[in-house]
Amino acid sequence: MSAPARPETGESPRRPRQLRGDLAEVAYREPVGEFAAAVADVVAEVLGVDRVGLDDSFYDFGGTSLQAISVCVRLEKIIGRTVEPADILEHDVLAELVALLSGGPGTALAEPPLDAALVHEAVARHAMTAPESIALVHRDASFDYATLHAAAGGYATRLAEHGVVPGGIVPVLLPRSPELVAVQLAVLRLGASYTSLDPRWPVARLREVLGMLGDPPVVVAASELRFAPSTAVWSPSGDLRRTAADGACRTPLHRPSPEDPAVVVFTSGSTGRPKGVVLPHRAITRMFRDGGPVGFGHGNVMPQTAPPWWDMYAYELFGQLMTGGTSVLTDGDYLLPQTLRRMISQQGATTLRLTTSLFHLFVDEDPDCFTGLRQVYAGGERMSPVHASAFLARHPGITLVNGYGPAESCMHATSRAVGPEDCEHADGIPLGEPVPRTQVVVLDPAGRRCPAGTPGEIHVTGEGLALGYLGEPGLTAAAFAPVGLKEGTVRAYRTGDLGYVDTAGTLHFRGRTDRQLKIRGYRVEVAEIEAAAASVAGVRSAAAVPLRGPDGAATGIALFYTCADAGASVGQDPLGVHEQLADVLPDYLVPALTSALTDLPLTPNGKLDRAVLESRALRRPRRRPARRSARSTPVRPVERSDS
């Protein structure tokens, strides 16, 4: 229909239709898409009203031609769509304008094309194409993709109200739960990134991490933070379905680039303070864009057992959600064989990922607990050929995959479907071949590619690389360096691992170039423990060495120190260093053995003799972990949001 001429005075030439009562009651009842909601928000802001529904008209609120021009300008800025004032003025209801902006009739609720390289949009695809498919299972409740998507939109509205903006980092201190997943997706939909932190970490470490984040405007937690009373805390509603039913996201969303940060993972740092590994969207999505590895996608069910502050949490959780599978959220810190059995029989688990040490334990203690699975992934440490062989003999129909990759290359950099022949290899189970959009090269000390079979330092390149370390440009430059290859110059991460590539292109592990360890899947920088011990009053010097199991794998840390007071007793822990370390380090960094010596042993060249210390550690009893006294768990409840 043609529109009559509009005066330039800003006066409405047409009498508005009768207003409909309380706008809050009529707005956002319909299950609108995010794009439609963003258009409605722009119109409502220009008109000066709280909300506008898709069946409302611009004239319902006395809209003028000048306001129509303002809407055009803002739509161009916020959602990148060009529209003429006449388009706004001549459509009876807002839904017609949305249809025009979305591409024509019949597409009024269509979203812009979803980008599989963005974590939240890869998940949202399944909310659009298979809304009733089960995304999450927690205890006796299940949540479909539509509910998860809608709840994330509701949480995004609340987070925006609390100051979350594109490019920000949101600390999240929540236990594993459907609400945690929805909050993480909400943060990503706002163009921000999140970092999940363990509220049980020592207070000093939590304060240090929050300081590294630059005093974020809000922390998402179950209750107020005793260690940071001035920090604004938002607690999400514990009713995901109610949040989803309350309506669509009511805040303009920001579409990030696949290069933008999505997650920050804090790891042990050799400088004595944690390192924040900044992972972009592309790193997390890279191996799942084409359907994902075996065991991921529609029809697959996977327990989510990795701690939320690990990069492998994203592998287990978002790996399934981005491919249309189902994630079963576990309670507690430890997966037990009997729990796994229940997940297989009651919830239909098909795929499992364990740290290598836990895989070994399950094979030793309850090898039949895997029965019913189709795939088992293990990684984080060297896989024992003895355990792999025993598993394959017991479960010939289950695919066993050995995964390798540091956090800086996000999740797995290589993987290997283990066969019986791998268990006979002289250098142990191979690390495998690169995952999609990832390359691995082995370089000599001069930076030249090593010939097949020749050991060197393993470097990882490709889309899985982190952006760097948060606020640490020097460390970033040292760890992520340009490498000149015949294909050209590429950015690569120096893993510090020694290995070689055989003639078939398979990567094999040979050891470390430094003192970094993997214990129960955790990365342990021995220097961080030594630095913490050296800061204890009365300690003159300190040295930490690994405690090793029968297979040579590190199972814990032994700490030896000398006292500044030459008259102090030795042999035990006269300065109480063990208890003091327990108050500043996460559990996995607290030594299992702490002992004072008169002097630290030296080699004939005058260097610390770590071999002697490892030998002494084998002859001394280990201590039980110190009981923490002043922990950082929140103690005071706060009012929960209704959405």
Image (spheres, rainbow, N blue to C red):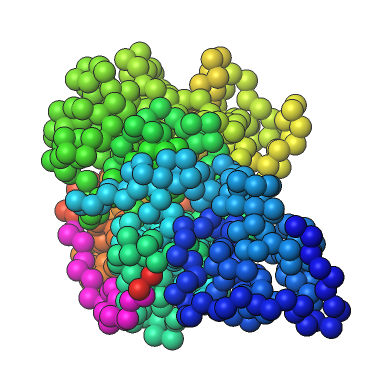
Q: Nearer the viewer, residue 427 or 593?
A: 427
> Which residue: 54% across, 48% down?
121
625 in the magenta segment:
yes
Q: Nearer the viewer, residue 238 or 571?
A: 238
Magenta region: 623-641
Location of residue 534 in the rendering, given as x and y in whole percent from the top left corner: 41, 69
Residue 116 as seen in the image, left or right of residue 26? right
Location of residue 489 in the rendering, given as x and y in whole percent from the top left corner: 75, 36
Q: To which quarter of the image does residue 351 belong? A: top left
Q: To which quarter of the image does residue 71 belong? A: bottom right
> Which residue: 32% across, 60% down?
241
Is residue 44 in view from this perspective? yes
Location of residue 461 in the rendering, given as x and y in whole percent from the top left corner: 62, 37
Q: Is residue 59 above or below residue 550?
A: below
Main secondary-structure element of the magenta-colored stretch: loop
Locate the C terminus by quadrant.
Answer: bottom left
> Which residue: 22% across, 17% down?
393
191 in the magenta segment:
no
Is residue 613 in view from this perspective? no
Which residue is outermost to the bottom?
230
Q: Is residue 413 above or below residue 121?
A: above
> Which residue: 47% across, 25% down?
432
Location of residue 111 in the rendering, given as x and y in whole percent from the top left corner: 59, 50
Q: How many marks?
A: 0
Residue 138 as seen in the image, left or right of residue 416? left
Residue 615 as seen in the image, left or right of residue 251? left
Locate the N terminus by quadrant.
Answer: bottom right
Q: Nearer the viewer, residue 370 or 643?
A: 643
